[in-house]
Amino acid sequence: MVGLDRTHREVRVATVLDESGVQIAVERFYRCSTRMITIGSLTRDFGDWVVR
């Protein structure tokens, strides 16, 4: 997430690049009525059964 527009209720998500620098997802804007931001990890789940 690189931006949040509360007035227009939009979340901006950045372009995603792979390890080689090749674009695998374009920048996007998502409209939302409720915002919930979660922070996670791709490598660790801390043994939490909910993550699996």
Image: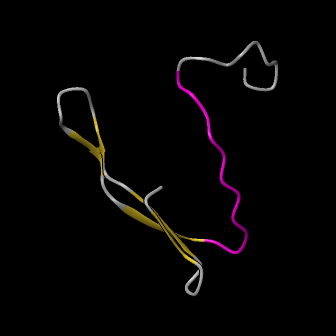
Q: Is residue 8 above or below residue 37?
A: below
The secondary structure that dominates the magenta segment is loop
- Residue at the spot 43% in from the left edge and 59% down from the top edge: 2
Q: Is residue 12 left or right of residue 36?
A: left
Quadrant in the rendering for residue 26: bottom left
Residue 14: x percent and y percent? 36, 55
- Residue sitting nearer the eye, 41 or 22: 41
- Residue sitting nearer the eye, 6 or 20: 6
Quadrant in the rendering for residue 10: bottom right
- Residue at the spot 17% in from the left edge and 28% down from the top edge: 20
Q: Is residue 36 magenta?
A: yes
Q: Which residue, as the protein is rendered here, is positioned at the far bottom?
A: 7
Q: Which residue, as the protein is rendered here, is positioned at the far right?
A: 49
Residue 8: x percent and y percent? 55, 85
- Residue at the spot 18% in from the left edge and 37% down from the top edge: 22
Q: Is residue 13 left or right of residue 7?
A: left
Residue 51: x percent and y percent? 73, 25
Range covered by the magenta-colored residues: 32-42
Q: Is residue 42 above or below residue 33?
A: above
